Image (tube, helix red, strand yellow):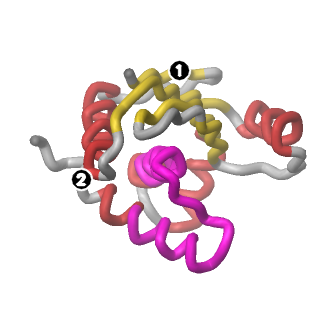
Amino acid sequence: MINFYSENEFELENPATYENWVKRVIASEGKKTGEISFIFCDDDYLLEINKKYLDHDTYTDIISFDNTVGNILNGDIFISTQRVSENAETYHVSGEEELRRVIIHGVLHLCGYHDKTSDEAQEMRVKEEEKMKMFHVEQ
């Protein structure tokens, strides 16, 4: 089950489209969908989570808490919609495209991908591009 919650004014348009996409991405990685919650929030909300649980005093666009059991993905993915908007401007992409990239970045973390080293980050970017292309592909 994929859940979408908002701790700010953000409202995801067409959540069923995102849910179907996330499920297809998960299946494409040979995994199964358990319970995944996306929580949209502002910078300050996510900063408090970053400080409290990760001991990082920095703003970020996403924090994933992985509760995966075996091949069944479970977790909470917190996304700062403020940071997504600012990143979209910085990278000269639409807000919707940046939101999809951040959503799938969180899902890829649950799938077992990391981005701590430069090699891991490169692999993550390749996977993001691959999965972004699946957004408009209906099966």
* Amino acid of disc 2: Met
Question: Can residue 95 be seen in this snapshot?
Answer: no
Q: Relative to 128, is 18 above or below?
A: above
- The residues colored magenta run 100-127
* Amino acid of disc 1: Tyr
Quadrant of the drawing holding the C terminus: top left
User: Left or right: where does residue 78 sit relative to residue 100?
Assistant: right
Residue 46 position in % (x across, y down): 74, 37
Query: In the picture, residue 132 is in which quadrant?
Result: bottom left
For label 1, the SS is strand
| Label 1 crowd (10 A; few <14 / some 14-19 / many >=20) | some
Residue 118 position in % (x across, y down): 62, 78
Question: What residue did someone put label 2 on?
Answer: 134
CA gap between label 1 and label 2 equals: 23 Å
User: Left or right: where does residue 53 sit relative to residue 33?
Assistant: right
Point 58% across, 61% down: residue: 114
Quadrant of the drawing holding the N terminus: top left
Residue 94 position in % (x across, y down): 42, 55
| Label 2 crowd (10 A; few <14 / some 14-19 / many >=20) | some
Residue 119 position in % (x across, y down): 57, 79
**Residue 69 magenta:** no
Q: Relative to 117, is 88 above or below?
A: above
Q: Earlier in the sequence, mark 1 or mark 2?
A: 1
Question: What residue did someone put label 1 on?
Answer: 5
Q: Relative to 110, is 1 above or below?
A: above
Point 32% across, 56% down: residue: 131
Q: Identify the residue at the far left of this view.
A: 139
Q: Main secondary structure of the magenta part?
A: helix
Point 50% across, 30% down: residue: 74
Q: Nearer the viewer, residue 18 or 53?
A: 53
Query: In the picture, residue 8 is in which quadrant?
Result: top right
For label 2, the SS is loop
